[in-house]
Image (tube, rainbow, N blue to C red):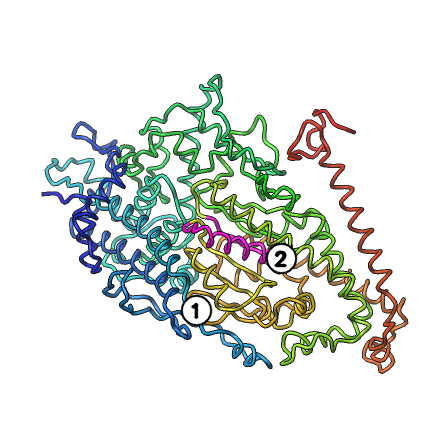
Amino acid sequence: MTASPLQTLATSACFLNIPLSPAMFKNLKEKHASLFESKQPNASTSESDRGQDLSSILDRSQRGDLTVLVAETAESMRVRILELFENNKHSSPDRVSPQPSPQKDPHGDQEEDSPQLPPRPQRKPVPGEAARKQSESPNKPLNPQSRVTVLSTFENWRDSVLLRVGEVVNQDNDDQPDQKGQSELQKAAQSEDLPLDEDEDRLKKLQEIYHPIETPLAHLPKATRLLILHSLLLLLLSLEHYSAYSRVLMLNVASSLNIDINILNQDEVKVARGLLATALALSADKSTEEKPKKNDDMRKWKVGIASVAGAALIGLTGGLAAPLVAAGLGTVLGGVGLGATAAAGLLGTLAGSSVVVGGLFGAYGGRMTGRMMDKYAREVDDFAFIPVRGERKRNQKDKESAEQDHRLRVTIGITGWVKEESNFVVPWRVIGADSEVFALRWEMEPLMNLGNAISALVTSAAWSVAGREVLARTVFSTLMSAVMLPLGLMKVAGVVDNPFSVAKSRADKAGEVLADALINKAQGERPVTLIGYSLGSRLIFSCLQSLEKKNAYGLVESVILMGSPTPSNTEHWQKIRSVVSGRVVNVYSENDSVLAFLYRTSSMQLGVAGLQAVEGVPGIENLNVSEMISGHLRYQYLLGKILTLTGLQDLDAGEIEREEAALAVEDKKEEKERLKNQEDAGVKDPESAAAQETVNSKEGFGEDTRLQKQVEVQTQENMASHRIEMLDLDDDDYSTPLKDDPSKHSAL
């Protein structure tokens, strides 16, 4: 007799020693009832239409192996969560592949075996660091209620996945006649010779990060393994969301099946296009239908320059025919494929509901948000998601744009300072097209003021003479005596201190807005990766803290923070780690004297993440880029190289070369400005005794007033140009620059 999904869950639970009471079975059945409503092939379905499915390409034993693989992977993810809540003095310095071990009741008092962690980069001890660590309190466990909430969220997801997998893998076709066409399809699944873009180095890197779990399925033919991965993706989508947990599960399974991450990424792109193409094709004949009313809550957001069509168009479709949807989703890369009906069965309700498809991609009145909630309107004046690729403004080509641009994953790049508006977008073009990439434009004027101020600081005569003393006399000094800095340098500090203080405060508030946007599904039911540098990292840090306070788990897949002006203490990073399902990478440079100078008046007893490794938190990866980053302004021009070092695979090689060329130009420009400022200050040799005497005098080089004026003029000129472009009375959300749409009524 064929086992039920609940029996499959029971088998997996017994294997992992997870106690399931009869009441829990009943609750699971009721909670996940929708999983039993998916379309299944019936006896009248032709073999050619049904094609491959899991029950035809895997025997019973192999389907059991798949269930065990998914259950083991989910359990290893659960163990990663649990180790955050253990009151260990220090996490293990070595990380190895976690092996699921018998677990006790997660809400009990018994201690569980925490898996060892992958190796963390080694670094030299920093003077004064020991004193800072002694002043820190011992590793505090997270709030017990947080443990209950995050485990509940994760286990609800895990249970729904196991139930869905169990429902599908336990279909039995033994009673069906062996058709000749079915046999031919099964032969195709045995192929090893497929035209795929595979790379051993990429696979090795994937397995270093997501340690493979040993499974007999890894020895199956390549085509069969691809069909398994593809089928699992469709199964996860049938849950009506593709959460961060689901994405991490897919990465782990790909690693265990020895499948290159590029194959998974391309499959996700293909599935996204298939869903959207079908929905948009059907919506073409429905253009006269009444548009759905906008959600009142979503009206609170102020849409910025980004507007991505698609969700509203999907919502106009009254329904999707399952075979039509599945026709674009059954084929796997390399030509091997599932049958239309089989794919529809895997997709479940997603195959027949345009509303669900719209929700998956962000059914938000057709716009990918930059709207800001009213309660933050007085605090955050500028907040918008800008698509890095595709059309910024979409009208007649909405359908084509949505189909081409939407992905199953979202990446948001967040800039930390700007000197011109393009700095919000251009640096993030280095990220490839496997995910839907947005640049976050936020608080342009404060960030432009900061960018100009930092540039003025590092090219000043005072910085040329005394800048190298900053690291020794601030964060890395036992006494942290910033007051010992030369008086002449402190006079110039006034140029940058206020802009940094203002922008830092705005970053904290914008982070809360971003958290609300994610919680309100502005990006749909898709996993989000957040990448930022400088104050962009602080914005992400604030966002994650807000998500933790609001118990919003399973939204963020991975986070990469570069040059972060944030604390590096354990307690803060434990909290942000708890809301990230995948990786958290802290990129720092011990040579970033600008960051040390800017952060000198903050809570330095808690450390500075952008200057040192984050210690004592399981799952935090540290990347030391001291040899590459000699100054804070260099992050913007070295994103591609740094992201390559983190193991991010989907990068644009052409954009990495462009960054290198742009850095060379910027270095020359900066050197020219530095020499001019030295000449104006009468400095012939920055290392001379005369220069040292001047910078230590009360008057310094007398350049602070001139530099302050220079910063103000540069900022106002750039902002004036921006305001003229955005001014349009018929465009109350300022989403369309006049030069791009001259037909609209304009105040000009």
Q: Residues within 10 Å of mark 2 (few under 14, many from 20)?
A: many
At label 1, the amino acid type is Lys
Q: Is residue 662 magenta?
A: no
Check disc 1 and report the residue beneath it. 140
Q: What range is drawn magenta here? A: 528-554
Please give the name of the residue rendered at 19% of the width and 46% of the height, measured from the top-left corner: 25
At label 2, the amino acid type is Leu
Gap between marks 1 and 2 measured at Cα: 27 Å
**Residue 651 point in image, percent of width and height:** 53, 53
**Residue 119 point in image, percent of width and height:** 43, 72
Q: Is residue 533 magenta?
A: yes
**Residue 205 point in image, percent of width and height:** 43, 62
Please give the name of the residue rendered at 58% of the width and 52% of the height, measured from the top-left corner: 430
Left or right: 718, with 663 as reference point: right
Q: Is residue 372 above or below residue 319?
A: below
Q: Nearer the viewer, residue 544 or 562?
A: 544
Please give the name of the residue rendered at 67% of the width and 55% of the height, measured from the top-left corner: 503
Q: Nearer the viewer, mark 1 or mark 2?
A: 1
Q: Quadrant of residue 476?
A: bottom right
Left or right: 60, with 717 as reference point: left
- Residue 85's label in the rendered image is none
Check disc 2 and report the residue beneath it. 535
**Residue 79 point in image, percent of width and height:** 32, 62
Left or right: 654, with 65 as reference point: right
Q: Is residue 474 above or below residue 191?
A: below
Q: Quadrant of residue 721?
A: top right
Chain-order first, disc 1 or disc 2: 1
- Considering the numbered disc 2 on the image, is that residue within a helix, a strand or a loop? helix
